[in-house]
Structure formats: structure tokens, C-alpha cells
Image (cartoon, rainbow, N blue to C red):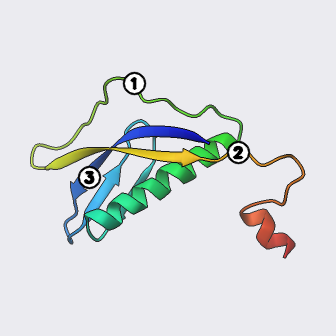
Amino acid sequence: MSRHTYTAVFLDAEDGGYNVVVPTLPGCMTQGYNFTHSLLMVEDAITCYLLAQRDIGRPIPVEGDGVLVRMGEERQAFLRKVTVKLGEPQATGAEPRGPEAVIRA
């Protein structure tokens, strides 16, 4: 099992809760209705992003020492390191996950 840590940026949402982005993982974003829910959602979003990278044969991104966060002047945010664990890849010939499993059912 491998561990991967990324910086998540929590931004206040207009309707309450938080919008969350992970700058090191382009397009990786989510939202939650409070901090706890947002944290669970970003852990899931990061895990899904990394599994997708691995499934298509791309390397798992590694976050460097610094993370650039760009925001508008009126926005407030806080940062938190989020660590996820990935299991080992499935062996070739294993039952498919995702849409393939639904199509075969």
C-alpha cells in the first residue's frame, strides 16, 4: 500500500460549506457542506484521480516542496495536507471495475 500527500485548498462556498481544489492534480476538485464533509470528499477525489492516472498508465504525480495557489483578492482560504492510501493494482485478468463491470452485468 502506498501513501500520497497533497495540499488541498478549502475555499468558502457562497451557499455555505467549502469548495476544495488540489493544485498539484489539475482538475481535481470537490465540495462539501461543512469542513468534515469537504475533507472526506477531497480524500475521495484524490483517490479517484490517482487510480485513474494509474489505470491509464500515467505516473502518480508527486507534490514538490512548494505549491502555488492563485486566488482573487476577496477570497479567503485555508490549506491542509491530505494523505490517501492506494492499494496495489489488480492483477491482469481480474474482474473489471467501473463501467465495464456494469456493462457485463
Spatial CA span between label 3 and label 2: 28 Å
Q: Is residue 60 left or right of residue 40?
A: right
The quarter of the picture where the N terminus appears is top right
* Residue shown at 52% from the left, 32% from the top: 61
Secondary structure state at the residue bearing disc 3? strand
Q: Amino acid at mark 1?
A: Gly
- Measured along the vertical axis of the image, is residue 79 above or below residue 36? above
* Residue shown at 49% from the left, 38% from the top: 4
Q: Amino acid at mark 2?
A: Asp
Disc 2: CA contacts within 10 A as few (<14), some (14-19) or many (>=20): few
Disc 1: CA contacts within 10 A as few (<14), some (14-19) or many (>=20): few
Work out which residue is located at the far right of the displayed protein and give it. 93
Q: Which mark is residue 95?
A: none
Which residue position is annotated with label 3? 10
- Residue 15 place in picture, x, y as percent: 21, 72
Q: Earlier in the sequence, mark 3 or mark 2?
A: 3
- Residue 7 place in picture, x, y as percent: 34, 40
Q: Amino acid at mark 3?
A: Phe
Spatial CA span between label 2 and label 1: 23 Å
Which residue position is annotated with label 1? 64
Which residue position is annotated with label 2? 55
Q: Is residue 44 left or right of residue 7?
A: right
- Measured along the vertical axis of the image, is residue 64 above or below residue 83? above
Secondary structure state at the residue bearing disc 2? helix
Q: Quadrant of residue 66?
A: top left
Verify CB contact (< 8 Å) between mark 3 and mark 1. Answer: no
Secondary structure state at the residue bearing disc 1? loop
16, 74: nearer the viewer? 16
Spatial CA span between label 3 and label 1: 19 Å
